[in-house]
Amino acid sequence: MLRTIVAVAGGLALLGASAGSASAQTERQLLQPDDWAYQRLSALRVQHGCSTATSEERLNKGLAISRFSAAALLQDCLAHRHGSTPELAPLLLQLGQELQQLDQRVEILEATQFSPTTKLKGLASMVLGGNSFQGSDQAKVNRSRSKFGATSFNYDLKLYLDTSFTGQDLLRARLRSGNFDRSSNSFYGAGPSKLSILETAFQEQSGPDIVSVNRLYYQFPLGKGFTASFGPRIGQLDLFAIRPSLYPAETILDLFTLKGAPAAYNYQLGAGAGLWWQSPGGFSVSANYVAGHGSDGNPSQGGIGTANAASTGSVQLAYRSDQWAAAAVVSSVQNLGGVIDYATNFTLNSLSNPGHTTAFGLSGYWQPKQSGWLPSISAGWGFNRTNYAAEVDRQGLVATSQSWSVGLQWSDAFTRGNALGMAVGQPIFATSLYGGDIPRDGNYAWEWWYKIQVSDNLAVTPALFLLSRPLGAETPSGESFRQLGALLKTTLRF
């Protein structure tokens, strides 16, 4: 069929333009209605239903056809007859040269039927913002104001280079740069708590204003619903069949992008691989592994599958329909290497000891059929159990911890294209300690934002966020300490 299509789509024009003078002369030769080959092909066309668009109209009108059109028609007749027969032998001999040239052209076209293409996409975020601190612990308030209280203007830039070789696979390279570092005073800045940090460039670069490869991985289908991914620079969230959350349309705090379970779903980035299966009915199963230190060949500092790999391995079971989705995930996370980021300072300090955490998460969303007064609802809950290495004194360290979040998002809020969002939740906080002490941990986080879609590729988002007790159990007994942030975020897509 492909041979016939090639001849139909322009065999005469393409072949004649690129052939030599001998080929051009051959192409100009015509089969006249009184030629025996013309009459034999006409009879075969009627008898077996073979045809090509180029020859059909001329044969119906009894007009001469080119030898290449005749060769293309003969190829279609061969397909209908399932090969050569004695009655076709004279025609094969008569049109042998044209058939050979058609075969050569088809081979060239088949070799280039999908030419690799690379698409460039960009995402730039510019943020003007600052932090304010209040509470009865005046010493901490004053210290935080002096270190993180100024207004700042920062940027984050991502460049996506997506390539496909078969039309179904994906080679992704993402370049990234930014100047949100740990001394930044904007809402991205660490402040006294890492909760006010998004997945910004400083977490993945050796320093601000440095362009580096932030993602490099290859993804391809295996058939029967399976998809495989691997790469030396891949994120854990790149390896799940679905992300069970619709929140947010515009990122403010990264905490609320992790489906209420920031230990099970984490931003670990490194060498990794994953496999998922999706059914036509909406069910999916995903399994993956990422080693944050997978590029380091020293097993005492990194590697893949070592005690110092800073790794996370996950399995997700999920279901998705038109209006809702739900997923359960379990992850085995190594404590060292900063795999778990979004927790109270008390819990983070405990997880800085060698060991591993088994993290469970339940997440899902629901959305109305049409935008209106009803928002989409995304919610999640996480439960974690932490074990420590034998040499670690576990007394007073975190044994179990939890987290949760709920995000509401209104599409087309007040005007078409805009979006309104609000989220509340608790980042990871200790619920029990080794030794039986009762933890005084816990912190509530809120964010409110309104995304103004100025054009298809430009959005401006004012936002507020509040951390009620970012230090958790490290807050002195009887004292209070909280953090309020405000920002104006401009997002450009190109």
Image (cartoon, grey):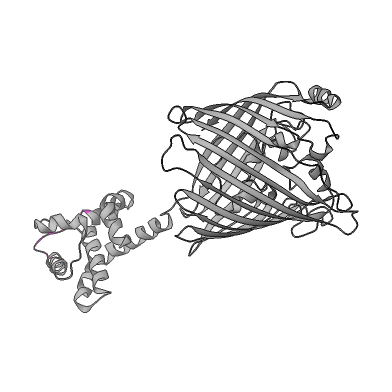
Q: Measuring from the top left, give residue 482's x and y in whole percent.
A: 75, 29
Which of the two residues, 43 or 379, is positioned nearer the viewer here?
379
Q: Measuring from the top left, give residue 424's x and y in whole percent.
A: 63, 37
Q: Is residue 388 left or right of residue 282?
A: right
Q: Is residue 256 left or right of residue 332?
A: left
Query: Residue at position x 64%, y 46% from top?
Result: 260
Q: Is residue 32 magenta?
A: yes
Query: Residue at position x 70%, y 37% from top?
Result: 444
Q: Is residue 148 left or right of residue 94?
A: right
Prevailing SS of the magenta stretch: loop
Q: Measuring from the top left, give residue 257's x and y in whole percent.
A: 61, 42
Q: Is residue 308 left or right of residue 328?
A: right
Which of the two residues, 61 or 469, is positioned nearer the viewer here?
469
Q: Is residue 185 magenta?
A: no
- 271 is higher (above) or lower (below) than 135: below
Q: Which residues are magenta?
A: 28-35
- Kindly indicate the quadrant of the structure image that contains residue 6: bottom left
- 31 is higher (above) or lower (below) than 83: above
